[in-house]
Amino acid sequence: MAHFQNRSEYRNEKNVKEESNFIKASWYLCDCLQLSDATSISSKYVPTTNISGILPDLVIKSSDSILFHVHTKVLNSISSNHFGGYGTPSHSAVTALEDSKILTIVLDIIYRNPNAAIDFAPPFPFDQLASAISRLPVYGVDPQVQLDSNASNAATAHPIYRALLAHATPHALELYILAAQHKMESLAVAASTYLVGFHIADLNDEQAEAMGPRYLRRLILMQSRRESMLKRILLQPPYPHPSTPDCDVLDQKMLTKAWTLCAAYFVWDIRADLPSAALENLLGPLAGHVSCELCKRLIREQVTKIVGEWEAVKGTI
Ligand SMILES: [Zn+2]
């Protein structure tokens, strides 16, 4: 810490620092004005963005000549390689390989821009979002650490993570592959819920290779586990009630046989994504074919039970 002989010396030192900061800011603004003569400025990364009292100290020019005014301190706080070597304050613009769309996403990930959740949700093209995420390692940014950590909590999930999930319905497989490639476990699990009904036979070699053996195996296991659970659940006829004058053991054996035949027939058409309503539609009508009120009640209770069991079967990898 500097020691000053008197208050006057302190004021002089302070004035010099303020003047120095003013000159630096002036140079920076002059550079920006000169640069902006020839190019456009990103609407998100402008020269006046103040973060904790710090103004941008670096201008990155995208391949399509858009200027991004950024804070090297912010870039370097996330990047392990000084943002690909660009993370040094400079009066001259540095040119990046990325176009402005990709660079905006990369920066929004680093800055955790809250608007990104909406900006990059559909109809924004998924492939551009995926391309930007695949470029993160070039800038020393780990997608898994930045996007997937704490993602299970909606309040702490990264805005881009939320944007990615918004693409899950139309791009479930691509999202799963992207998550697998970057070991984004939370994202892979979330995407897998949309792949319960995916036909593994439709997977081509490139897609299988892109997701890798581990995530491919987990996807296959998820589906086979659900199918075997559904078979087991289906083959549970109602438990017999004590014999009554109107319904004895033989009558109830007929019901058990009818249930088993119905379930066995259905097993041929089993699907891991079978809706609960299909189970109700298959087994519920059996109650209409028996006259015993006890049997009717037991059928309805059993249908409710197996629907509950089916809905509880895990629907993710
Ligand atoms: Zn009965």
Image (cartoon, grey):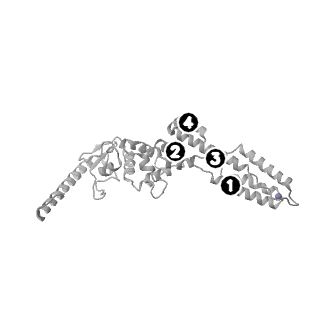
- Residue located beneath label 4 in the image: 204
Query: Element type at marker 4?
Result: loop
Frontmost of labels 4 and 1 is 1
CA separation, marks 1 and 2?
Answer: 28 Å
Q: CA distance from mark 3 to mark 2?
A: 19 Å
The amino acid beneath tag 2 is Tyr
Left or right, 127 with reference to 288: left
The quadrant in which the N terminus is found is bottom left
Q: Residue at x 72, y 56 (%)?
A: 303
Amino acid on which the number 3 mark rests in the picture: Arg
Judged left or right of residue 94, residue 215 is right
> Residue 295, percent across and down?
80, 58
Residue 17 lies, in percent from the top left, at 17, 57
Residue, disc 1: 307
Mark before the other along the chain sequence, 3 or 2: 2
Query: Do labels 3 and 4 touch, CB within 8 Å?
Result: no
Q: For mark 2, does the 10 Å Cα neighbourhood hold few (<14), some (14 to 19), or many (20 or more) residues?
A: many
Residue picked out by circle 2: 176
> Left or right: 266 with respect to 141?
right
Q: Secondary structure at mark 2?
A: helix
The amino acid on which the numbered mark 4 sits, given as a three-letter code, is Asn
Q: Quadrant of residue 238?
A: bottom right
| CA distance separating discs 3 and 1 | 13 Å
| Residue farthest toward the right in the current orientation of the protein | 245
- Give amino acid for label 1: Val
Left or right of 256 on screen, residue 160:
left
Mark nearest the camera among 1 and 2 is 1
Q: Which residue is mark 3?
A: 226
**Label located before the other in sequence (3 or 1):** 3
Sequence-wise, the earlier of marks 1 and 2 is 2
